[in-house]
Image (tube, grey):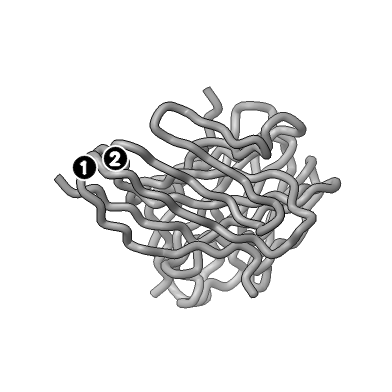
Amino acid sequence: RKEVEQDPGPFNVPEGATVAFNCTYSNSASQSFFWYRQDCRKEPKLLMSVYSSGNEDGRFTAQLNRASQYISLLIRDSKLSDSATYLCVVTLGGGYQKVTFGIGTKLQVIP
Amino acid sequence: DVKVTQSSRYLVKRTGEKVFLECVQDMDHENMFWYRQDPGLGLRLIYFSYDVKMKEKGDIPEGYSVSREKKERFSLILESASTNQTSMYLCASRGTGGTYEQYFGPGTRLTVT
C-alpha cells in the first residue's frame, strides 16, 4: 500500500461548482498534513495546512479524519484559476519529520 | 519572501556525463531537499540535508550524490547520467519548527540523451 494515496483525476468541473478531493495515508503515526498546489510547469506551493479541528481559508476547507486516516480538501465556487494539481502531503514526526507527497489530483475548471 | 533558486531551468546532457544541479536558498533554512518529479509517480525524495556537510538518503538515492558545503547551497550530482534520469528536479528548503512548510525552487528539467 502506498504511504499517501490520491486519485490522480482529472476532475473536470464547471465554474461555480463545489469539488472535493480525498487523500488517504497509511502510517497512523503521521503528525502533520498539508495541501500544496502545483500549477502546470511550476513548482509546488503550500495551499494550506490541515488541522485536527479542520480549517477554512476563503473558499477552501481542509479536514483531517485520523480514525479513517484521510484528509480532504473542499473547494467551493470553483474559479478557472483553481485549475491546478493539488498535492496531499503527510509528515511523520520525529527528528527529521519525513515528508511524503501524494501524486496529486488534477483539477480542471471549465467555463 | 523565501527564495529558492536553481542553476538551470532546462538542461540537456549526454549519457555518461557528470551533471551538477545547484540550489541556493536565502532564508537561512537548516533543511534542504532534492526531489525528482515524474508523471504518475509524483515527487520522490532523492536526498536531504539537515545541516552543513550532513546528508541523508531519501527514497531513490541510487545514481545520485549530494554536497552541502555551505548552509545556503545544496548540490545534486549525477555521477554518470543515464536516460532514466531524465526528469524534473526540484529543490526545496525548510526551516526547523513552525509549519514545516517546504519552499520549492522553480525546478530543472533535465533531459539525458
- Residue B67 seen in this snapshot: no
Determine which of the numbered discs, if any, sits on residue A78 in the image.
Answer: 2
Residue ID for mark 1: A15
What residue lies at 52% left-to-right and 38% top-to-bottom? A46
Contact check, label 2 and label 1, Cβ < 8 Å? yes
What residue lies at 32% left-to-right and 58% top-to-bottom? A11
The residue lying furthest to the right in this view is A95
Q: CA distance from mark 2 to mark 1?
A: 5 Å
What residue lies at 70% left-to-right and 33% top-to-bottom? B95
Image location (x, y in percent) of residue A89: 59, 50
In terms of image quadrants, where is residue B13? Answer: bottom left
- Compared across the picture, whether B72 is left or right of B84 comes to right
Is residue A110 positioned above or below A28 on the image? Answer: above
The residue lying furthest to the top in this view is B1
Give whichever of A74, B13 is nearer the camera: A74
Is residue A59 positioned above or below B15 on the image? Answer: above
In terms of image quadrants, where is residue B88? Answer: bottom left
Image location (x, y in percent) of residue B11: 40, 58
Give whichever of B39, A32 is nearer the camera: A32
Give whichever of B83, A91 is nearer the camera: A91
Q: Read off the chain for label 2.
A: A
